[in-house]
Image (spheres, rainbow, N blue to C red):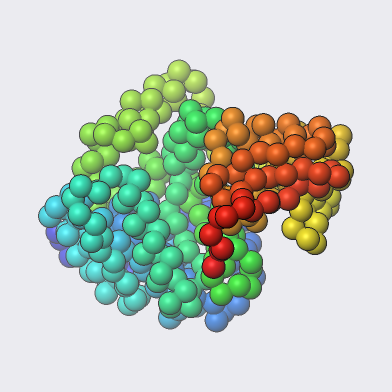
Amino acid sequence: MKTHRRIDWPGTAEALAARVPVDRLHPAVVAWAGKRPQSERWAVALSGGADSLALLLLLWAHWPARRPRLTVLHFDHRLRGTESTADARFCKRVCTSLGVALVPGRWTAGRGHRSEGAARAGRFAFIGREMPRRRISVLWLGHQQDDVAETMMMRLARGSGAAGLAAPRAIHAFGPAKAARGHIHVRPLLTLKKAEIVRALRACGAGWREDSSNAKGIHFRNRLRRDVIPLWIRASERDALAGAALSRELLEEDDCALEAWVDALRPVNADGSLSAARLAGKPRAVVRRALHRWLLLQPQAGELSRKGFDALLRSVERGAPARHSLGSEGFATLRARRMRFEKMRGSPRAD
């Protein structure tokens, strides 16, 4: 949508909030936000597109007390030439009108490295630097129900389990809650469809930036969005997007239950070993999660293939002595029903 005309963004935000009241946002996010300390700093990831713009406007209007401690993060991927530059200028105009701080970032990678995956990594590296630097612990993101369906289909294609299919979550904490680098991602728009957001913005006279690359089908997500999702919705003859959103919620519930089960078993011992004895006879989903946790605690372990992980999983289930390679630095050894990381002889000492 064209965004050249002057827009009263505070008035537009209030008009949008009237069309999308708080009770239309994800209830878990609304309840969570009401309990957060007023001193907490929040950030919004703003691309200039309809979803992230609606998020910023609704956050500004529905939580006015948060405005002084609200920061907007915009990352210029430099993938679309003058379009990307115009996105950045648009975001600056919106933030200036709303009176909120804007922190811009700009990708400096060479043209040969500008793939979608690398761009995403560059964006999150920027966010990962700026949030702790500015003592921001909460990042608000504009994912909505269309994104849920697209993400679910992408992850089904690669064989994800409940944890992967439960993304994107309404509230997702990373790292220890009180750690300096711990942070929380919040997505209040998961109760809304893209079409609903666009209709509400148009009714309020809002403009936004369109990413022309979305229509080209270069990337998997764009092909799903353009070619697959519309056919899937028509073939279902029902509200398939709402169905996918409900499935995501149910999968998150299952994932949380399994995580709680693993917590109760306390499979990782004080010495850092994994207890195959405590996992004996438990469902494979529980053993799998416990093993994943243990592997994440091994900084010298290499990246395992799916075949390698399954072999390790079978050994933990059997509980018999075993030894598996974990990359060039060492092995996973199972003795006396305890799995430990065994450093390879002659390997360089870890820092």
Q: Quadrant where the C terminus lies?
A: bottom right
Residue 7, by quadrant, is bottom left
Of residue 106 and residue 31, the one placed in the foreground of this image is 106
Q: In this view, does 300 lie above or below 89?
A: above
What is the x, y in percent for residue 184? Answer: 55, 63
Question: In this rendering, would 127 be left or right of 216?
Answer: right
Q: Is residue 27 above or below residue 59?
A: above
Of residue 99 and residue 281, the one placed in the foreground of this image is 281
Of residue 108 and residue 242, the one placed in the foreground of this image is 108
What is the x, y in percent for residue 342? Answer: 68, 51
Is residue 53 in view from this perspective?
no
Residue ID at (56%, 51%): 329
Residue 324, by quadrant, is top right
Q: Residue furthest top?
A: 235
Residue ID at (60%, 34%): 308
Q: Which residue lies furthest to the front in this view?
A: 346
Is residue 33 in view from this perspective?
yes
Count of numbered tags: 0
Of residue 125 and residue 270, the one placed in the foreground of this image is 270
Residue ID at (25%, 49%): 113
What is the x, y in percent for residue 112? Answer: 20, 47
